[in-house]
Image (cartoon, rainbow, N blue to C red):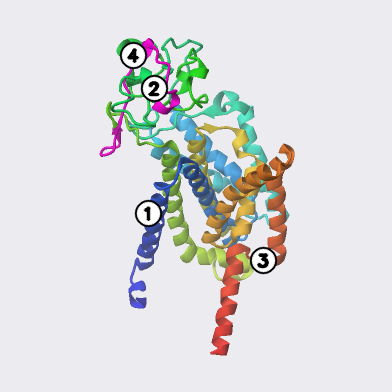
Amino acid sequence: MRDLMRLPGARLIQHALLAFAAWAVLMWVNGSVDELTNYYLALIAMYATAMFGMVILVGLSGQVSLGSGALMAIGGYIFALTTLNWQYIPLTSIPMNGVWAMLFAAIGGVVFGLVIGLLGARLTGPYLAGLTLGIAVGIPAIANRFPGLFGGETGLQLTVPYPDGGYPAVAEASGEQFVTELPTSQDALPSAGASAGAGDLLTSDNFPSGDASALPSVAPGDLLTADNFPSADPSAMASVAPGDLLTVDSFPSAGATPEASSLDVSVLDPSTGTGTDGVDLGFVLERWEASLAIAVACIVGFIALNLVRGRQGRVWRAVRDDPVAAAVSGISPAGSKVTAFMVSSVFASLAGAVFVQILAYVGPGAFGLGLSLSLLVGIVLGGRSSLVGAVIGAVLLVWLPEFVLGLAGDRGWDEQVTNNAPNLIYGLLVVLVVLVAPGGIVGTLQALVGRIFKRTARSG
């Protein structure tokens, strides 16, 4: 095995297999859980993508950064502007899609990372922290200075390029009232007792052509929500909130109305995952978001793993440990810092592009200073020099607020206390880690394992 690992490209293949195995396991988990867990998986993968870059910048390069949230904003806004304004890639006839938009976001991350790295190459300690803090506050605020381009404080609503068969964007009706009647009962659906099962989704194709034309902003095959029927009596729907997708279960079991007698329910075909009208009813938005975030995180993790374990990783560690000795050895400390900033910026920009697709929105409020501080807290808790620590930190960033909310609900805490409790716990955990376990969770576990092996070797 050692001889095989010495072959050219062996380490690259090993890292590729590791990344593929992680992707396969996570995709299996993603397909086996409910929509809420899919959403949490998407957030964890998105945070991990950004924190892989922080491992390189903070852990390996030894620099302080409070601006990762601003770098995510760069990627998010570039993704939004390219998808909203370009139907084709400039100077080509290639149609714009989500993959190309994320590539443009990565290029933007390279450019901004280079600029920030050059500005901070000769700064250390609190001066570098001050620079990145100014970036974290200033870049999201630029949206307010150019509201015509960036949407100002309200931000921009995205038309996310979902795959074919997914949820197409539904434009607003510009105040027009839909005149189509909403059925008030399962009995009003002719096929409800025969071919339709519980949970089957309604689409615009379920309406005859005359009724479908009354939905001016809905295209054929679009999935319908309660918002498509503002004239309907809300009491006729069972537990349906605005924006909810309509299914057979949305209607009570009695009280048929003649207006709905021409409706037909789309039925899911288990063998193909599509409905009888060809619409992909097996598409789950949260699952798709998690799939996207997991794929990006695994690709970024593969790149980061090769950098960390390769020559560039040794260069970063050398400059971090002793910049004078590194300079004597022919390594440029300034060039090393600029490279670390560029790599971290690219990863953060990709995470921002994923984030805005999860939100279907981009605005300065989504990339405030709190996001940068949360990423820094996560990397300190998980272990600032470990890629595994970045994943653990991402899990903590998603799990801890939900844990606090559940605890607050059980104990009846005041809303103001509940909203601020996660920040208080973050601060206490950081102080505890700095005092007791400076290496974070991963560093502490590695130290414990090392001590156990040493004791075993001595006793043996």
On screen, residue 26 above or below 226: below
**Residues shaded magenta:** 248-274
Q: Are marks 4 and 1 in contact (CB under 8 Å)?
A: no
Q: Main secondary structure of the magenta part?
A: loop
Q: Amino acid under label 4?
A: Ser
Q: Secondary structure at mark 2?
A: helix
Which residue position holds label 2?
186
Within 10 Å of disc 3 (Cα), the crowding (few <14, some 14-19, many 20+) is some
In this rendering, would 160 be left or right of 389?
A: left
Which quadrant of the structure image shows residue 362? top right
> Which of labels 2 and 3 is toward the front?
2
Pointer 3 residue: 437
Mark 2 neighbour class, 10 Å CA radius: few under 14, some 14 to 19, many 20 or more: many
Task: Give the number of the disc on residue 261.
Answer: 4
Mark found first going from the N terminus, 4 or 1: 1
Mark 4 Cα within 10 Å, few/some/many (few <14, many 20+)?
A: some
Give the amino acid type for the residue marked by disc 1 in the picture.
Answer: Ala
The local secondary structure at tag 1 comes to helix
| Cα distance in 3D space between marks 4 and 1 | 46 Å
Q: Gap in Å between the C-alphas at discs 4 and 3?
A: 68 Å
- Residue type marked 3: Ala
State the residue at coordinates (66%, 65%).
438
Seen as rendered, the residue at the extreme front is: 254
Crowding at label 1, few (<14), some or many (≥20) Cα neighbours within 10 Å? some
Give whichever of 348, 109 is nearer the camera: 348
Label 2 vs label 4: CA separation?
11 Å
